[in-house]
Image: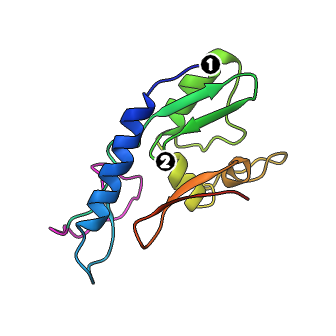
Amino acid sequence: MQRSRAPESHQEAVRRLQASYRAVPDGVPVRLAKRTSNLFRARIPTGAPGLDVSGLTGVLHVDPEARTADVAGMCTYEHLVAATLPLGLAPLVVPQLKTITLGGAVSGLGIESTSFRNGLPHESVLELDVLTGTGEIVTTKP
């Protein structure tokens, strides 16, 4: 069992995410407030507040026996592979671009990644915590 981020710090990151959501004024589009992007198009700068996802970047837990990993949504495949490979594990589907995040691959239906045996990245997700439009965090399962 490997842990790279304390559960309390993850919970604090979730609280910051929710607080940043509450800070977005009514009628203003919700966006991620992050420094990097794998989108290859120009963005128009905005002064509007965005969602603070800065703390949702790591591998929280790897369970070699269950062959599962608990990761934050902004965890990159590069970091997930680095945490799992020493244990003889790897994600079932790995996008070509190593800086794609798990959340991005799931919401973007794989970013051009698929596996004949395992399908698209979202098909190997056992559960997902989602920030809803009301600011709540809900856990979803297939």
* Secondary structure mostly seen in the magenta stretch: loop
- The residue located at (62%, 55%) in the rendering is 110
**Is residue 84 shown above or below 125?**
above
User: Residue placed at 67% from the left, 54% from the top?
Assistant: 122
In three-dimensional space, the C-alpha distance between marks 1 and 2, rounded to whole angstroms, equals 20 Å
Residue 78 at what x, y percent from top left?
Answer: 51, 33
Figure coloring: rainbow
Find residue 92 and report its horizontal and vertical position in percent: 73, 39
Q: Which mark is residue 66?
A: none
Under circle 1, the secondary element is: loop
Image quadrant where one finds the C terminus: bottom right
Callout 2: SS = loop
**Measured along the vertical axis of the image, is residue 43 above or below residue 33?**
below
Q: Is residue 77 left or right of residue 28?
A: right
**Identity of the residue drawn at 14% across and 67% down:** 47
**Which residues are the magenta region?**
33-48
On screen, residue 14 versus residue 45, left or right, reads right
Task: Categorize mark 2 by other alpha carbons within 10 Å: few (<14), some (14-19), many (20+).
Answer: many
Residue type at tag 1: Met
Q: What amino acid type should be assigned to the residue bearing mark 2?
A: Gly
Name the residue that disc number 1 marks. Answer: 1
The magenta stretch spans residue 37: yes
Residue at image point 49% right, 31% down: 79
Q: Which residue is mark 2?
A: 73
